[in-house]
Image (spheres, helix red, strand yellow):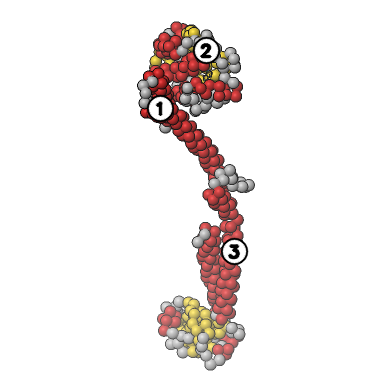
Amino acid sequence: MTLRWRLTLLVSVILTLTFIALGALVYYLMGRYLTGAIDTSLALRAREVVNSIKVESNFLRQQRITLPDVNVFAAPDIFLQVVDSEGFIVVKSSNLGRQSLPVDPRTLTQAHLGIDFFSTESIDNYALRIYNIPLLLKGQTVGILQVARLLGPVKKTLSDLRRILIFLGLVAVLLATFLGYILARAALRPIERLTQVAARIGEGKDLAQRVPYQGPMDEIGRLAATFNAMLGRLQRAYTRLEEAYSAQRRFVADASHELRTPLTTIRGNVDLLRKMKGTDTAVREEALADIASEAERMSRLVNDLLTLARADAGLEIKREPMEISVLLQEVARQAPLLGEATFTARGIENLAGQQVMGNRDYLKQLFFILLDNAFKYTPANGKVELSATVDQQKIIIKVQDTGPGIAPEDLRHIFERFYRADANRSSGGTGLGLAIARWIVEQHQGEIKVESRVGEGTTFIVILPLLKTV
Ligand code: ADP
């Protein structure tokens, strides 16, 4: 059963019950009112009769009562009867004909106690309301006056009322059910639309859809807004996921491709060595050297891939306070071994005592990636410089070279994995160095920038936050 029908049913059940309760109350009050009116009229009539009863004394000082003509007090629907203390009829109004008003033992008992009371009786299927009033003489009950009235009209009124109430009740319930259904449908329509949109999204995966809702910010409005906000978040997350997934796929494809090249060279050289029957040592040495250098390249590549895989897996570099100048001096000492260009270090001594939150091994790897590139791409007569300065709470380390520079269109991509500027394809690099460098800098809450001019040289700038000295 749908919510709409449940709501409708609830409304009609509540309404039906309310109507039954109300109808019953009206019916009961009306019954009481009508009977009350009859009782009042009976009591009035009885009072009139009693008032016209005469008490006379004869010469023996015996008293006796004289009854008036009861027919004077009767009306088409009012009957009178007087019985003596034994219950025998003394006189009755002529409209009773051959009938008489019932006198049961209870009536006599009550009368002897001097109590007047009302009772409802029926004669020949006619319901009668009777007022019994004892007639007293010197405190003795000498008879009973009974005034009665037919209850037929009251009964008829009440049964008419009952029919009207039932009819109106049915109409009201039907109307309420109909209105309830329409109201429930109107109230639930936005939810219906929400369901439709959700279903469409489920089928078509179109996360750009939104629930169209124009209305007040009530429960439904908030539901629609929440739903739309959730869709927005889902859409963003989905886009990010798709980007990450395609990046991952690209990475795997590139990695397999990069690994295949050295393997092909190694296999080619091994085949050559196998086929070589003679002992041409020069060729053999060359083949072995090729194998060795490709194997080394491969192990570098695998190492780099491993580092990036760890980075992707969310590895966080462990850091501790360390003196940066000590590390830079060590790097500067080893740097000249990386190539033939002239190397200078500048400003490292100014950093003495300055501390950063860092990881010695990873920071060393970072500077070697930059210096290695600088030496790799700078001719022997060029220059490579490592310089350091402190600026407010940051330290700025620059690796500058006088190499060929990087074209502006390449500059945007050099931090991407496997990206190598075409001109440097033959450099033997993996294209992963700068991607790793960027990850290391990010892990140190730092920044890495590059400035380059084709034909003049390149400068890589690493900015690291200084540890606040207390
Ligand atoms: P690779 O192993 O190829 O050096 P990197 O990620 O370290 O990979 O560098 C990406 C590319 O950026 C290089 O292939 C090169 O084209 C360019 N590049 C990096 N450093 C320099 C530099 N100092 N001078 C000129 N080009 C550079």
Question: Would you name the residue on which mark 2 appears?
Answer: 379
Q: Specify whether residue 147 is in view.
A: no
Inspect the image, locate mark 3, and give the three-letter code of the amino acid beneath it. Phe
Extreme residue in the front direction: 278
Q: Is residue 74 above or below residue 2?
A: below
In the image, which is nearer the foreground, mark 1 or mark 3?
Answer: 1
* Percent position of residue 247, x then y: 50, 34
Inspect the image, locate mark 1, and give the three-letter code of the amino acid beneath it. Leu
Q: Is residue 273 left or right of residue 37?
A: left
Looking at mark 1, is its residue's CB closer than 8 Å to ligand 1? no
Query: Tag 1: Cα neighbours inside 10 Å, few (<14), some, or many (≥20)?
Result: some
Query: Camera-side residue: 112 or 459?
Result: 459
Query: Camera-side residue: 377 or 210?
Result: 377
Residue at 43 percent of width and 87 percent of height: 86
Query: Which is more N-terminal, label 3 or label 1?
Result: 3
Question: Would you name the residue on which mark 1 appears?
Answer: 272
Query: Which is more N-terminal, label 3 or label 2?
Result: 3
The secondary structure type at the circle numbered 2 is: loop
Q: Is residue 226 above or below residue 167?
A: above
Inspect the image, locate mark 2, and give the three-letter code of the amino acid beneath it. Pro
Query: Which is more N-terminal, label 1 or label 2?
Result: 1
Query: Tag 2: Cα neighbours inside 10 Å, few (<14), some, or many (≥20)?
Result: some
In which quadrant of the rendered image does the C terminus lie? Answer: top left
In the image, which is nearer the foreground, mark 2 or mark 1?
Answer: 1
Q: Is residue 364 above or below residue 148?
A: above
**Circle on res. 178:** 3
Query: Tag 3: Cα neighbours inside 10 Å, few (<14), some, or many (≥20)?
Result: some
Tell me which corner region of the image, top left, top right, bottom left or bottom right, holds residue 231.
top right
Mark 2 → mark 3, Cα distance in angstroms: 91 Å
In the image, which is nearer the foreground, mark 2 or mark 3?
Answer: 2
The secondary structure type at the circle numbered 3 is: helix
